[in-house]
Image (cartoon, rainbow, N blue to C red):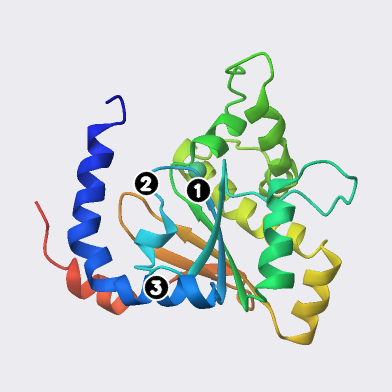
Amino acid sequence: MLFPQQLIDGYRAFLIGRLRHEQDRYLGLAESGQSPQIMVIGCCDSRVSPEVIFDARPGELFVVRNIGNLVPPYSPDGAQRAVSAALEFAVQALKVKHIVVLGHAQCGGIRAFAEETEPLSSGDFIGHWMALIAPAAAAVGPRGDRPLGHYLTQLEQASVVKTLDNLMTFPWIKTLVEHGSLTLHAAYFGVATGQLSVRDPTAGKFVQVAADDYTRLFAQPRF
Ligand SMILES: [Zn+2]
C-alpha cells in the first residue's frame, strides 16, 4: 500500500488511545452535530496546529488554516472564497462566540513577503496571497537597520492585527462584534519557545498568557 505508514501507525495510536477514551464524545457529536464556540484562523505550518496548542477535543474548535493565517477583506463578488465561506458557516450557522487569529514565529509566508522571494511557480500563488499583508508591512515601516528576526516578528504580529481589521469588513461580523456577541482575538505562538501571547486591545500589545505556569514549567534548563 502506498498510503504513508506513518499515518497508519498514527491512526492505530488514535484507535487505542484517543478514540477509545472519547468514543462517547464522537458518538454524541455525530448525533447532535458540532457546536464549537471558537473559530481559529491559523497558518498551514505543520508546527502550529491549533488543536495541539490549545489541547482541544473533537468538536471544540472550528479551524481554518491557510498560508500566513490571513483573511482577505469582504468581497461579495461571486468568486470562490474559501475563508469567507468558512467564516459564513462559523458565524451564521454555528454562531461561534470567538474568532482567534493565530499567528506564529518563523512564518514562511511572512518571510517570503519580506524577502520578496522568487515565485515557486508561474502562478505565483503565494506572492499574490501574501500581498494581503502589504498594509501591515506599511504599518510596520521599512526594515531599516532592524535585525531580520525582530522585523519579521513585528510583521507577523502586525499582520495578525490587520487580519482582525479585515474580519471587521464583513458586515455580519462587524454587527455581532458591536453587539458584543462575537469577540475577535489576535494571538501569537512562539515555535521555539512554546510561548503563547494574546494581544491586549487596550494596551495595543501582545501579552504572554499562562506566564506563571510557563515560568514554573520551564524554569530549569531542559537540555
Ligand atoms: Zn506561517
Q: Position of residue 18 (x, y in %)?
A: 25, 64
**Left or right of 36 in this view: 106:** left
Secondary structure, mark 3, is: helix
Q: Which mark is residue 153?
A: 1
Which quadrant of the view contains residue 125? top right
Upstream in sequence: badge 2 or badge 1: 2
As rendered, which of 17 and 177 lies closer to the eye? 17
Q: What residue lies at 31% left-to-right and 30% top-to-bottom?
A: 3
**Left or right of 58 in this view: 159:** right
- The residue beneath circle 2 is 47
The amino acid beneath tag 2 is Arg
194 vs 78: above or below: below
Secondary structure, mark 2, is: loop
- Mark 3 closeness class: few <14, some 14–19, many ≥20 residues within 10 Å: few
Q: Position of residue 183 (x, y in %)?
A: 65, 77
Residue 196 in sight in this render: yes
